[in-house]
């Protein structure tokens, strides 16, 4: 969820072939309506109490998450960095095999 890696990755991609692999957990993108939850910023220690059961919270959280995913994908594409998304709880074999088969045919 942090984007501080983008600048060094872009610089590296100028001289090297990069394949980024994102490991995602669906729970990072959809918070269930559990009521009041205290969130803490690991870097600053700042805490925020949010009511995750509020319809407005649920309505705003998902689009924000989707926007973040789309922005990351766009960054990788614009810097010619291949990107593989893997999901926790799912097999990694099929996405990796599919990616490398597509890449092989693309590079021929």
Image (cartoon, grey):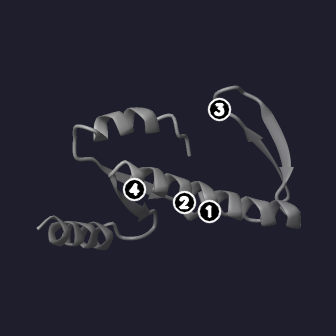
User: How far apart are the alpha carbons under marks 2 and 3?
Assistant: 24 Å
- Quadrant that contains the C terminus: bottom left
Where is residue 29? Give x, y as percent.
62, 60
- Mark 1 in CB contact with mark 2 (< 8 angstroms): yes
User: How far apart are the alpha carbons under marks 4 and 2?
Assistant: 11 Å
User: How far apart are the alpha carbons under marks 1 and 2?
Assistant: 6 Å
Question: At x 19% / y 72%, what residue is drawn?
Answer: 101
Question: At x 80% / y 66%, what residue is drawn?
Answer: 59
Where is residue 100? Give x, y as percent.
21, 66
Which of pointers 4 and 3 indicates the residue nearer the eye? 4
- Mark 4 in CB contact with mark 2 (< 8 angstroms): no
- Mark 2 in CB contact with mark 3 (< 8 angstroms): no
User: How far apart are the alpha carbons under marks 1 and 3?
Assistant: 22 Å
Q: Residues within 10 Å of mark 4 (few under 14, many from 20)?
A: few
Which of pointers 2 and 3 indicates the residue nearer the eye? 2
Residue located beneath label 2 in the image? 70
Residue located beneath label 1 in the image? 66
- Mark 1 in CB contact with mark 3 (< 8 angstroms): no
Q: Sequence order check: which comes first, mark 1 or mark 3?
A: 3
Residue located beneath label 3 in the image? 42
User: How far apart are the alpha carbons under marks 4 and 3?
Assistant: 30 Å
Q: Sequence order check: which comes first, mark 2 or mark 3?
A: 3
User: How far apart are the alpha carbons under marks 4 and 1?
Assistant: 17 Å
Q: Is residue 75 left or right of residue 13?
A: right
Q: Sequence order check: which comes first, mark 4 or mark 1?
A: 1
- Label 4: element kind: helix
Question: Viewer-proximal residue, 42 or 80?
Answer: 80
Residue located beneath label 4 in the image? 77
């Amino acid at each position: 969820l942090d984007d501080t890696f983008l600048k060094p990755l872009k610089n590296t991609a100028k001289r090297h072939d990069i394949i980024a692999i994102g490991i995602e957990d669906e729970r990072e993108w959809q918070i269930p309506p559990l009521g009041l939850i205290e969130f803490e910023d690991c870097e600053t220690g700042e805490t925020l109490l949010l009511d995750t059961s509020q319809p407005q919270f649920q309505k705003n959280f998902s689009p924000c998450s989707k926007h973040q995913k789309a922005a990351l994908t766009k960054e990788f594409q614009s810097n010619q960095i291949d990107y593989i998304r893997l999901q926790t709880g799912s097999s990694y074999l099929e996405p990796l095999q599919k990616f490398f088969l597509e890449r092989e045919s693309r590079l021929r």
